Image (cartoon, grey):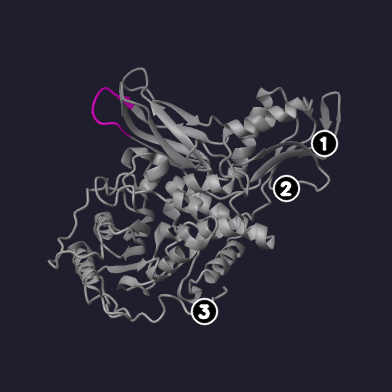
Amino acid sequence: MHRRLFPRALAGLVLVATAATAGAPTATAEAPTPAQTRLHATIDAILADNRLDGAQAGVVVVDTTTGRTLYDRNGTRRLIPASNTKLLTSTAAMELLGPGHRFATDVSTDGRRRAGVLSGDLYLRGGGDPTMLAADYDRLAAQVAAAGVRVVTGDLVADDTRYDHDRLGPDWTWDDEPYYYAAQVSALTVAPDTDYDAGTVIVNAVPGSRTGARPKVTMTPDNGWLRIDNRAETVAGGETSISFERQHGTNTVVVTGQIALGAATESDWVTVWEPTGYAADIFRSALRRHGVRVIGRTVLGTATPDTATPLARHDSMPLAEFMVPFMKLSNNGHAEVLTKELGRVLSGSGTWAAGLSAIGNYVGDSGMDTGTLRQRDGSGLSRRNLVPPAQFVTLLTSVRDEPWFGTWYAALPVAGNPDRFVGGTLRSRMTGTAAANNVHAKTGSLTGVSGLSGYVTSADGRVLAFSIVLNNYLTSSVKGLEDQIAIALATYTEKATSTARRAVPTAPESPRVPEGRECSWVKPALC
């Protein structure tokens, strides 16, 4: 990875604290102002919470205008960042791919057409688009039919060769594999809805017609790639407790538990095994609906010939627009696709290694000291990712000068804004405080890991860049502590105020998030 050769704004900081609740923040070159001293005391008090006993905490706050460090606690300590990792991936994508970058999915043939008969194979080539819906495949099929094709004598070939066939990150835990936040990555895939969780299907269950009957189970989109093994039961009363789990290495979804008569629909997102086949199945069904019959079989993973004749094409939304569902909802699959797309575009290799190399070069050129960090995937799902909070703040400060910054900044979750595609993973946090509709930041969550890194405008109009990364705590959540720090920053002012020590701000309680999952990962009901 390339390392910038100029002095970094945060270089030379000295660590003096060795645990989250011990020691004091790192000293800065300038003597702290009275306001800064009060801020130190406030954040120190927040970090002294017993939920962080034995844990590690890194917090850095910088005034982006002056470059002055207002607070530093363990800023150079390497910590697991969870989805704060997406800050690196998203900024690299905006710079290296460009806000106008689109993913293309096309259909072509190597055969001859005559009187509605295509003598040859039909190729469906994926360009990595994670926003492809069943409706988009239907439109591609309509274009093929509009070209006069009625019968294909050869095979339907699903071309996913833009990226390699490594479907899962090398460090992802095996027990995450059925869940949609760890969906398999393919250049040819399907998303079930406009959250664009590519490589997943939504499984729905409604009560049966009588007690003891099996619930009615459906999938969105309807497909023949997955099979339902329905073992659940409809009951007269009591709690609904139903689960959907795909068996490892298969596309069999086992439905267990019970659903009460009269209960509302129960739904969950389930990953598919081999998204390329899933996409091919959806497209083949769409062709059939439009009167196009493919006589041959479905073949996965073969490249489209250079001489193939195009028949249909779909282009995704531009990257600038794609940033919204990606960053607001912290979509892991989007991050991994962008990582492989960076590798493909910059070096011709659609792999994690090539993409991570490109990201490392970009963030190094932006001032991050890549010798102090490790990035193993695009999303932050790997627990081998390590980034010091000070390096996040360096990146956050640097990208403010990029021409695409306004677009990227608007894609960050906004605290306390109830609109799901504005507030994102922060929509239920810091409501009714000075941080609401002020803090723009990326969240991060794994079991024992939490992070919040972004921007806040202080009470006297200063734009502050901050990073809060908390590791190795045993309590269920420390989001409230992050929120207290963000609120303290939103109320910070250098203007003359009372010298009395400010009380630690309180934060509204955030909805509890199941261990290991971000709020976006558990979908709207818990966010």
Between marks 1 and 3, how big is the CA–CA gap?
A: 58 Å
Q: Is residue 171 visible?
A: no
SS assignment at label 1: loop
Kindly identify the amino acid type of the residue bearing the numbered disc 3. Answer: Phe
Kindly identify the amino acid type of the residue bearing the numbered disc 1. Answer: Gly
Observer-side mark, 1 or 3, equals 3
| Residue under the image location 29 percent in, 52 percent down | 435
For residue 120, which numbered disc appears in the image?
A: 1
Residue 408 x %, y %: 49, 53
Q: Which residues make up the magenta segment? A: 234-241
In the rendered view of the protein, which quadrant contains the N terminus? bottom right
Label 2 sits on residue: 302
| Residue under the image location 26 percent in, 48 percent down | 510
> Is 505 on the left or on the right of 116, as rendered?
left
Label 3 sits on residue: 6
Contact between labelled residues 3 and 1, with CB atoms less than 8 Å apart: no
Mark 1 or mark 2, which is nearer the start of the sequence? 1
> Is 332 on the left or on the right of 467, as rendered?
right
Observer-side mark, 3 or 2, equals 3
